Image (spheres, rainbow, N blue to C red):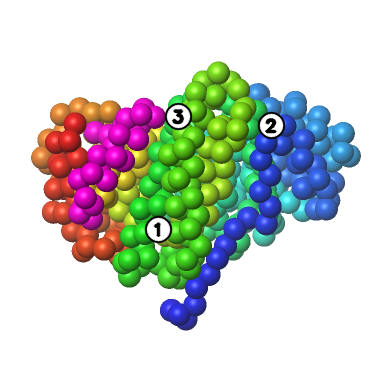
């Protein structure tokens, strides 16, 4: 079993301005009543547009709203209220919570799921992972679908219209993947699929990094203008598709492990996932003993796109030694720590955090 290796991906990935119009073609083979899962904000923003697109194609969706946090109880309730709708497929439309809710409902109903992100703030739309929280927004579990989403539909006109902070966060989530996949391959751990990685995970994660180097600044500028151009398209593909396939097939490492500690840290717990990961990527590079020039290059990239390179920028000014130790201690509870070239210890991680603080 341990010698098996696996690759996983969505069946289809559709991206571009107006991609929402492709949704009926994706859904139609699964019956007239797709189950749409969204949140109140996105329903207000896009509900009429989605309803129009679907009804034009003869589809009559049932619509469910996730009212608050994505908890097991909330997912159970949504799935129960959908039971009688006779849906053949679930569609999540919105931000991370709405997509996770759609995945959680599809898991409970045994139906395929399509993800339609309204922002590109992380790579979860392509992934089989479902982040489950408690009522106080503490991560309690990462559930998994039996397969990746049936399709991912990314309307870049929506991404360009959303606040630029979301795309910036997505870049922070994506920039880690090259280094995490490399650490997983060099270490002894496994990917999200539970197997040692195939080469393709690193190939995709490396490509993700290269696209960000070439296009992140221009892509963010386009988003700020609300414009869809080639740079924005390239960055969105890197943030959603290359990053998602890169991590699921290439493996996570210390950078994502550190988000466990940050989720409990003063101030930093409020930062977006991708902001946390951007900073944590620097910490990982220092912890694994990367050459100073490479650390400086990564730091320069993060500064250039406006991502955090210190705890103060994450909302935790003047961290005490004890607070740094707490972040390191909770980081040790993450499942990706074998994916590192050096043994991950609390001392190593705390030291790397302090070294990154010293850079700024
Ligand atoms: Zn992530």
Foreground of the two, 148 or 358: 358
The answer to whether mark 2 and mark 3 are in CB contact below 8 A is no
Q: Earlier in the sequence, mark 2 or mark 1?
A: 2
Can you tell which mark lies on residue 52?
none
Tell me which segment is drawn in magenta.
Answer: 287-310
Q: Quadrant of residue 50?
A: top right
- Which image quadrant: the C terminus? top left
Can you tell which mark lies on residue 181?
1
The residue under label 2 is: 17
Total marks drawn?
Answer: 3
Q: Left or right of 260: which side holds 8?
A: right
Report whether residue 335 is seen: no
Relative to 40, is 224 above or below?
above
Residue 72, percent from left and from top: 51, 49
Few, some or many residues within 10 Å of mark 3 (<14, 14–19, 20+): some
The residue under label 3 is: 217
Residue 187, percent from left and from top: 31, 67
Residue at 23%, 44% (x, y): give it: 293
Residue at 23%, 28% (x, y): give it: 312
């Amino acid at each position: 079993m341990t010698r098996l290796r696996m690759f996983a991906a969505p069946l289809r990935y559709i991206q571009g301005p107006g991609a929402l119009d492709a949704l009926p073609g994706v859904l139609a083979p699964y019956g007239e009543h797709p189950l749409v899962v969204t949140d109140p904000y996105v329903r207000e923003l896009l509900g009429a547009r989605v309803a129009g697109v679907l009804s034009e194609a003869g589809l009559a969706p049932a619509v469910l709203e996730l009212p608050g946090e994505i908890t097991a109880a909330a997912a159970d309730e949504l799935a129960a209220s959908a039971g009688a709708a006779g849906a053949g497929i679930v569609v999540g439309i919105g931000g991370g919570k709405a997509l996770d809710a759609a995945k959680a409902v599809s898991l409970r109903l045994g139906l395929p799921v399509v993800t339609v992100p309204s922002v590109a703030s992380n790579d979860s739309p392509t992934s089989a992972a479902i982040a489950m929280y408690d009522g106080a927004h503490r991560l309690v579990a990462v559930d998994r679908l039996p397969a990746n989403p049936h399709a991912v539909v990314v309307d870049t006109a929506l991404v360009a219209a959303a606040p630029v902070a979301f795309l910036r966060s997505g870049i922070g989530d994506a920039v880690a993947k090259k280094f995490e996949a490399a650490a997983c391959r060099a270490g002894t751990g496994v990917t999200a699929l539970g197997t040692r990685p195939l080469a393709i995970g690193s190939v995709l994660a490396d490509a993700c990094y290269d696209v960000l180097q070439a296009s992140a600044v221009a892509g963010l500028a386009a988003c700020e203008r609300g414009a869809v151009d080639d740079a924005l398209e390239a960055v969105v593909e890197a943030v959603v598709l290359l990053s998602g396939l890169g991590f699921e097939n290439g493996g996570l490492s210390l950078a994502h492990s550190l988000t466990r500690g940050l989720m409990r840290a003063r101030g930093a717990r409020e930062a977006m996932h991708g902001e946390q990961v951007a900073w944590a990527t620097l910490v990982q590079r220092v912890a694994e003993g990367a050459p100073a020039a490479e650390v400086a290059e990564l730091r320069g990239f993060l500064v250039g796109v406006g991502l955090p390179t210190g705890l103060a920028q994450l909302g935790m000014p003047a961290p005490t030694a004890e607070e740094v130790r707490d972040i390191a201690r909770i980081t040790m509870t993450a499942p990706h720590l074998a994916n590192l070239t050096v043994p991950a210890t609390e001392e190593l991680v705390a030291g790397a955090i302090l070294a990154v603080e010293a850079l700024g």
